[in-house]
């Protein structure tokens, strides 16, 4: 098949550190091409060279046999036929859905005014094409993370021109999506490829790659080490190419300890869940799952006081937390790692040190001065423990790759030695090598006595890691799986039961 997009010798360094080394890559018309690699291997940087966000130090890009100017001017990529869903520069929370979808492409009337009825129709059509039931006038910050990811996708595909052959570039689009939404996204991607355009797809989920991609390219430390047809490889081989070694077993051995009750939720109700009650014990890892919109992912935020509970109470030990707020939850020994790290958890322009230290600054205060050295040492230990790369406390958080930001922020909460830790999609965006370390870490803190609650749509991970999984349907606990019944197939079946 014809080569649509060719990368020739693309090279990029940041402050003298080589991040991409002479990358050559051909993308063919009609293919879905996966790009994989460990956290920090250079995937997003490569994509940002294509979008004109960064300028390459060397190298060139050919689109439909013509050289394209690098770096591109703003808007140039889209005019040429390159469309992006970026990993971090997502949709703008304070704008409405309509504004996000249509910004930069408004149609005007003869008088030069924006034709809002027409715009609203165009937005509705874009949403309907993805079967998204979102009000175009809703503020994006009020739209749940999963739908927001699909919104970014809807925006990226609006201007695709299949007759000339365009390229759609998706940087971890499935990070927030549970199964059925992923299937929908994949159907849309297949349709795009069938019509003659090409899709570049970044994901850490190898099962997805094996399912959807025609070919896959592997980046390791900024070098493109392999491009193969998925039909001619296996997930195992891809992992070895990514890590440069075999992975071994992914999942930690599950501890059996189950001590006294640490956390109690009684008759909790919020926006999605109603009258939910459960206990979590010392050393226990409890999973909460369900399909999109079933409410399991609201529970950590209710328990933490970050989402307003319509009713119900939360106990830590024997004490009920009155007037639950995040500050009181932290005071009672509860920690939360939200899924939407960009929005809720990290401060992108602050340094890694400031981000990781932030949760317990008090511990390092003496008089009014931060005990810098003690603090730096503690943060450094967290970065080393979770293998954050680079393990440099003084870098701005935003210059870390997505997965490394994630590990640093998890480390921040692990440091506080909480009685209860609430995790929402903890391994999102984390590569398979680091995932193993992270899961081991979670198992270790549970074994040391912390009660762990994980809200996630990663069924396989839940099945291996948790002692118990609660399945939510329509805002209520519909099933509880433990022991031999706690398998990936068992969870899937329970989630899909009507
Ligand atoms: N603006 C920047 N300034 C300095 N270093 C940067 C900047 N952006 C990225 N880097 C570094 O470049 C390397 C590659 O990062 P990149 O974001 O491309 O990784 P990635 O493969 O997308 O990883 P992930 O899977 O975690 O998203 C990392 O070491 C990162 O710290
Ligand atoms: Mg990335």
Image: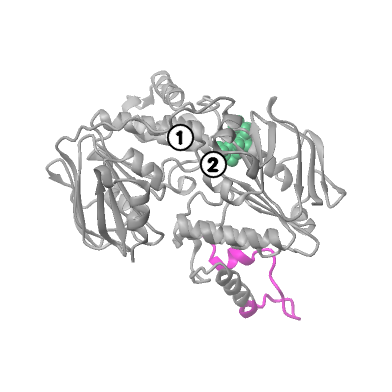
Total marks placed = 2
Expressed as whole percent of the image width and height from the top left, the position of residue 143 reads 46, 62
* Nearer to us in this view, 455 or 97: 455
Whether label 2 lies within 8 Å of ligand 1 gets the answer yes
The secondary element bearing badge 1 is classed as helix
Residue pointed to by mark 1:
435
The secondary element bearing badge 2 is classed as loop
Q: Quadrant of residue 237?
A: top right
Please determine whether, in this image, residue 131 is positioned above or below residue 109.
above
Residue pointed to by mark 2:
204
Task: Quote the CA–CA distance across marks 2 and 1.
Answer: 10 Å
Expressed as whole percent of the image width and height from the top left, the position of residue 449 reads 23, 31
Q: Quadrant of residue 259?
A: top left
- Which residue is painted at 39% across and 62% down in the image? 293
- Give the extent of the magenta segment: 94-118
Camera sees residue 350: no
User: Is residue 354 left or right of 35 when viewed as pictured?
Assistant: left
């Amino acid at each position: 098949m014809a080569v649509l997009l060719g990368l020739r010798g693309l090279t990029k360094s940041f402050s003298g550190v080589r991040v991409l080394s002479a990358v050559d890559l051909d993308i063919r018309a009609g293919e879905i091409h996966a790009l994989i690699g460990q956290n920090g291997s250079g995937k997003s940087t490569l994509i940002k060279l294509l979008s004109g966000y960064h300028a390459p130090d060397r190298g060139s890009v050919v689109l439909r046999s013509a050289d394209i100017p690098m770096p591109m001017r703003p808007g140039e990529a889209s005019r040429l036929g390159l469309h992006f869903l970026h990993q971090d520069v997502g949709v703008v929370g304070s704008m409405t859905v309509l504004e996000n979808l249509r910004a930069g492409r408004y149609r005007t009337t003869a008088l030069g005014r924006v034709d809002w009825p027409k715009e609203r129709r165009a937005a509705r059509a874009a949403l309907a094409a993805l079967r998204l039931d979102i009000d175009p006038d809703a503020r994006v910050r009020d739209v749940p993370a999963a739908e927001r990811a699909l919104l970014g996708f809807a925006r990226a595909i609006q201007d695709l021109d299949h007759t000339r052959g365009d390229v759609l570039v998706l940087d971890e689009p499935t990070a927030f999506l549970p199964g059925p939404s992923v299937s929908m996204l994949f159907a849309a991607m297949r349709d795009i490829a069938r019509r003659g355009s090409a899709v570049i797809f970044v994901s850490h989920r190898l099962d997805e790659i094996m399912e959807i991609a025609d070919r896959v390219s592997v980046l390791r430390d900024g070098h493109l080490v392999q491009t193969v047809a998925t039909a001619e490889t296996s997930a195992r081989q891809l992992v070895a190419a990514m890590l440069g070694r075999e992975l071994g077993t992914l999942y930690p051995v599950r501890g059996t300890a189950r001590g006294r009750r640490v956390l109690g939720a009684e008759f909790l109700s919020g926006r999605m869940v109603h009258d939910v009650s459960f206990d979590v014990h010392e050393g226990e890892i409890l999973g909460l799952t369900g399909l999109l919109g079933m409410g399991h992912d609201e529970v950590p935020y209710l328990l933490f006081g970050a989402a307003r509970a319509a009713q119900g109470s939360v106990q830590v030990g024997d004490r009920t937390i009155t007037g639950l707020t995040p500050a009181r939850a932290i005071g009672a020994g509860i920690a939360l790692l939200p899924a939407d790290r960009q929005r809720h958890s990290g401060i992108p322009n602050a340094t890694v040190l400031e981000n990781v230290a932030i949760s317990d600054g008090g511990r390092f205060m003496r008089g009014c001065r931060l005990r810098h050295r003690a603090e730096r040492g503690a943060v450094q230990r967290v970065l080393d423990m979770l293998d954050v790369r680079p393990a440099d406390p003084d870098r701005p958080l935003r210059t870390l790759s997505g997965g490394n930001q994630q590990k640093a922020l998890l480390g921040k909460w692990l440091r506080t030695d909480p009685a209860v830790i609430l995790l929402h999609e903890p391994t999102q965006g984390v590569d398979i090598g680091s995932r193993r370390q992270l899961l081991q870490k979670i198992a270790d803190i549970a074994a040391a006595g912390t009660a762990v609650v994980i809200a996630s749509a990663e069924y396989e991970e839940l099945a291996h890691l948790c002692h118990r999984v609660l399945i939510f349907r329509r805002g209520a606990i519909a099933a509880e799986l433990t022991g031999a019944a706690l398998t990936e197939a068992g969870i899937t079946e329970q989630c899909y039961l009507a």
